[in-house]
Image (cartoon, helix red, strand yellow):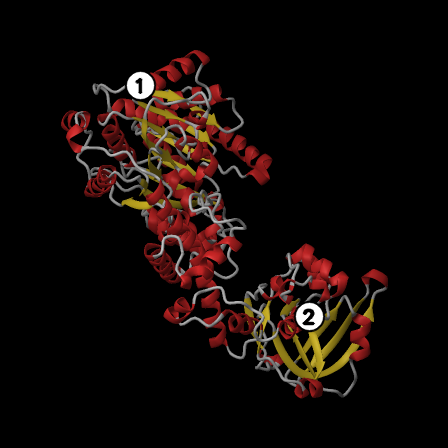
Amino acid sequence: MNVLYDDIQFLPGVGPKRADLLKTELQIFTINDLINFLPFRYIDRSKFYSISELASAQTAVQIKGRFLTKQINGVGAKAYLKATFTDGTGRIELTWFKGMKWVNSMIKPGVDYVVFGKVSDFHGILNMTHPEIEEFSKFCNHPQQDFIGVYPTTEKTRKANLNGKVMRSMMESAFNKIGLNGIVETLPKYILDECQLPNLESTLRTLHMPSNLNQVSKAQFRIKFEELFWLQLSLAIRKQNSKENIKGFQFFRNNDNLLPLFYKEHLPFPLTKAQIRVMSEIRKDLESGKHMNRLIQGDVGSGKTLVAVLAMLMAVDNGFQTCLMAPTEILAQQHAKSIQELLAGIPVNIALLTGSTSKKARQEIAEGLQNGTIHMIVGTHALLEDNVQFRNIGLCVIDEQHRFGVAQRAKLWGKNTTQPHVLVMTATPIPRTLAMTLYGDLDVSVIDELPPGRKPIRTAMLRDSQRQKMYDLMREQIAQGRQIYIVYPLIQESERVDFKNLEEGYQNIIKAFPEPQYKTIIVHGKMKPAEKDEAMKKFASGEAQIMVATTVIEVGVNVPNATVMVIESAERFGLSQLHQLRGRVGRGADLSFCILMAGNKLSQDGQTRLQTMVETTDGFQLAEIDMKLRGPGDIEGTQQSGLPISFKLANLAKDGQIINLARSIAFRIIEKDPHLLNQENYILQKGLKERYNQQISWRDIS
């Protein structure tokens, strides 16, 4: 049996107690798990620092010198060892709270030691807590590893003194036990040769026991490539499988009837070049006879919904029904209203189905869908219910796909014997590298142009001390007949605090803008749906000039008369969400404003985010910056169930070139060998089975 899968407790130097800690805290169960537990950075042990050149908050450093004093202070659980260390250029204090008896017995006067640890500054005195120490003579007598890996830790592993030195010792034991040929390669030789990648065995040895940082860089590249490659390979297979196994309805241009009528008499404004380009891509898909699986990415206000309506008209012209599924009731209602307005006078029957649709209306809708008298339906998750059956659905449009699970979407596809064409829309700008990962199996269209006449939104950042300026702008805009949004953050972990802030903010606005001269409404998630709808209607109708709200208005509210968006505690939002909120204004022909209200104390990241908002209105540029600032996992709304976006080393924000390389190779392989049947690709088929813990299902692998 391969020693790689031996229980970790049987590795020399581990034992049951330490093994339990490794398993519960670091998920290291076997020797294989251990060698795949990788350092996240490296420390240069080849250099000695002098105390006179040290500064606090450095990474760990090593010093050579002697102990001047040592003393155990306190008693019992509060005891600690404090020592003074010098190298002739200065002094530093060393402190141990654990293992102090052993350290105390080890320290001898007049002997040179090597001390290694992180420096901090406590009331102007340099110190190290729990440094590693070793007699200089012993340090010189054993071979030194110049670059030392730093491993992830938890509070419990730190308390148990499971430090870098212990980890390095365990890694050496593991590689000694495995031997030279114990690690099996996971990539075909032709990929290693093409990309000039080291083999897996030398890669792992280098990462744990490097001799120089150039070696580390090559080894890290290999791991990053492999992590991204397996994901891209699964996406390539899923896309290939869709082409092979899912037939698509074929739409014919000579069936066009309603579409030309709409173009001629109802088009609200000339299409932009970007909209025309995307429509051409959709038309090509629908006429090919192959199944369409396309994503439309477009900034706020770029006209994605209009493009979707044009595609839906193509479906109706060809005798098919269509649906548009939205993640919230407000958004579904908004879509239904805008589509009905666009198609007023066109002989198309449009229905709306949400959780609050009455029982009687539901029955009528169910009958209309089954007998084909309803051509288009807009809805929420209610569309997934078993009693919602179509006569012949040919196109599904999904708004913000990431808010629906894989199983939910599959249920919608199952409403016809042949899977309907799929058009996904997202107004959340996604960086290209992230889109290639989240939506790698979709064909992507981008609407990167705003309709003519849309004026850029002026954005400004104000501190709390400048609040009067914000009030002045509000009064000026209301005097011109305009309306105002004021949005407060609502974060689940601190909901009470946030709700209090919202209520206080509402009261402050009422004081500054008293009735009857002004009308202010409040909207938040704790309100009953009917109350929320009533408040929204008052704002949409113009009865209320100011709406104080949480982020429930992030999507689904379209009031062209609203020209000011005030975002309170703006530093608590990510760039993507700030951009979404800003997109609620500027929807009419009037000049609009976005005011970012920030606390007087602002972190560097917060300052960068808000300044970036002031400088650009490009959602895609903002998304790229947001990912670099916060990391891909934190970008709101980008996590999609079913995708293994958990990497040891790869970083979607920084490794765009590696993603491109991994993607091009993965898709090329599947194009040449769709089922990985060639002998050279057997290793890939085997790897996919192991990684996804299942027999490969070419139909649904993801």
Q: Position of residue 622 (x, y in %)?
A: 37, 50
Tag 1: amino acid:
Gly
Q: Determine the image quadrant of residue 453.
A: top left
Q: Residue furthest top?
A: 360
Q: Position of residue 27 (x, y in %)?
A: 64, 56
Q: Give the residue number, with chain letter if any, for mark 1.
A: 372
- CB contact under 8 Å: marks 2 and 1: no
Q: In this rendering, would 287 be left or right of 13?
A: left
Circle 2 or circle 1, nearest the eye:
1
| Local secondary structure at mark 1 | loop
Q: Nearer the viewer, residue 178 or 460?
A: 178
Q: Give the residue number, with chain letter if any, for mark 2.
A: 166
| Local secondary structure at mark 2 | helix
Q: Nearer the viewer, residue 381 or 256?
A: 256
Residue at 51% from the left image edge and 49% from the top image edge: 695
Where's the N terminus, which quadrant?
bottom right
Q: Determine the image quadrant of residue 303.
A: top left
Q: Nearer the viewer, residue 260 or 395?
A: 395
